[in-house]
Amino acid sequence: MSLTVSVVIPAFNAAEQLRCCLEGLGRSTTPYVECIVVDDGSADETADIARQFGARVLTTGGRRGPAIARNLGAKAAQGDILWFLDSDVSPYADTLGRIVRTFEEDPGLDALIGSYDDSPECQDFLSQYRNLMHCYVHQHGQRRACTFWSGCGAIRRNVFLEHAGFDESYRRPAIEDIELGYRLCMTGRRVVLDKEILVKHLKRWTFWGLLKTDILDRGIPWTELILRDRHMPNDLNLEISQRVSVALAFLLMAFTAAAAAFWGWYFLTPMMALLFMLLAPYWLELGQGPRSKSLPVVMGLLIGLMVWRAYAHRMIGVVPPLILAYLMLILRHRYAYSDERKRRLTGIVLGVYILGALVFMVTHLPAHMLVFAVFVLAAVIVILNTQFYLFLAKKQGRLFALAAVPFHLLYHLYNGISFVAGLAHFTWRSLFHKTARLAPARRGHEPQ
């Protein structure tokens, strides 16, 4: 007798992405018993779109978070297998078939998770960078998983109910799936990562949304979970190379701050020019968005600041490469994107120029061991993450991979900040609860 599958999708103001998700699900070559969409207090047409595709719609009665929404859907489901999908992913036609086949071939399997594919839907720089990073992490993870993932994760219904589902204390999209995975693994349940089970991520990232998600919704609560369970596996985002990268990123910032304090703008001017060059593809991508008219002004102000400081410190050699880079970026933004051949040609020219300009800028930095240490630390971090940058270069080109380096350094830096904040919050809560437990005992020993 074949296994039956219930699809559970929590959704909050996800009308358009949910449509794509359900369209992808509708192309599945393997049947499922039901699709349950749990509306978590949406103010748009999320529920109506779900009904249009024949989904069973439940509601949480207000904004209560995806953990509660998924648990509600799971309790109402009838299938042997619960397949959790996020509303911003689109499965392939064979995704469900691979899930069912994996469970049928391995009766001892309790849960499995899939992976994002390597062709994210949104084409802007940040979305491509971030979603490809997720794909890379999935595709390089160990098959015996140490966690669960609700973006595309399947679990036997009886196992899910036995472990009381997702922790409903997480009232926002956070690490409720990771927490469930930790509990599964700690009780000896077997979870695997199947890299051939793919879904397409539809999410469009913004810079501030990325910071908020990584620090508040992921980094800090994940740190507290690690401290609570005293378990930090060498897998996925927690590989030893990533931990070392975080430590090196903090050292890099400390050395950079020391150099800036010692030399001031004499150090910062060429460093800002280096960063401007590295971010060239990001500037280009911004130029295609709705705020493209303001791009020349913003870039011009930055160039003006660097040119002013270069003149003030008699670093005249920095000025021509900066101005030429500005002109090349603006011209490519305006004229190259209508023609693929022009885009490729100008990309090669721009890439060669930027690499040459980077080397040129380095020669204008102070010749000192402190500056040398800054570049050594940066180089070590890049070497530790070489495979990731090669992956980005293969998918989006070398210029894209070059522009990803500053964002990846920032990622390591705020991961470290998240860990420190999570450690502080966990310690404070532990002391508070300990004090609260001791208070009644003290009152009981007070003289009458």
Image (tube, rainbow, N blue to C red):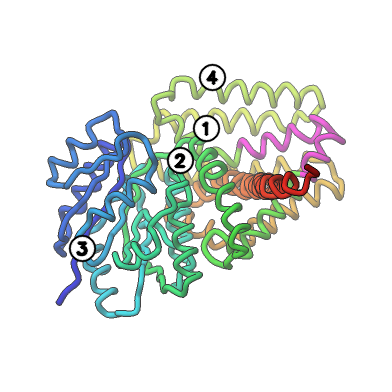
Residues at circles 2 and 1 in contact by the CB criterion of under 8 Å: yes
Per the model, the C-alpha gap separating discs 2 and 1 is 9 Å
Residue drawn where x is 32% and y is 63% of the image: 154
Quarter of the picture containing the N terminus is: bottom left
What is the number of the mark on residue 346? 2
Q: Residue 183 at what x, y percent from top left?
A: 48, 64
Per the model, the C-alpha gap separating discs 1 and 4 is 15 Å
Q: Main secondary structure of the magenta part?
A: helix
- Magenta residues (range): 254-276
**Does residue 219 show up magenta in the picture?**
no
Residue 49 visible in rendering? yes
Amino acid bearing label 1: Met
Q: Which residue is mark 4?
A: 297
Element type where label 1 sits in the image: helix
Residues at circles 4 and 2 in contact by the CB criterion of under 8 Å: no
Element type where label 2 sits in the image: helix
For marks 2 and 1 on the same chain, the one whose residue lies earlier in the sequence: 1
Amino acid bearing label 2: Thr
For label 4, count other residues whose C-alpha is less than 10 Å away and answer few (under 14), some (14-19) or many (20+): few
Indicate left or right for 164 with 19 as reference.
right
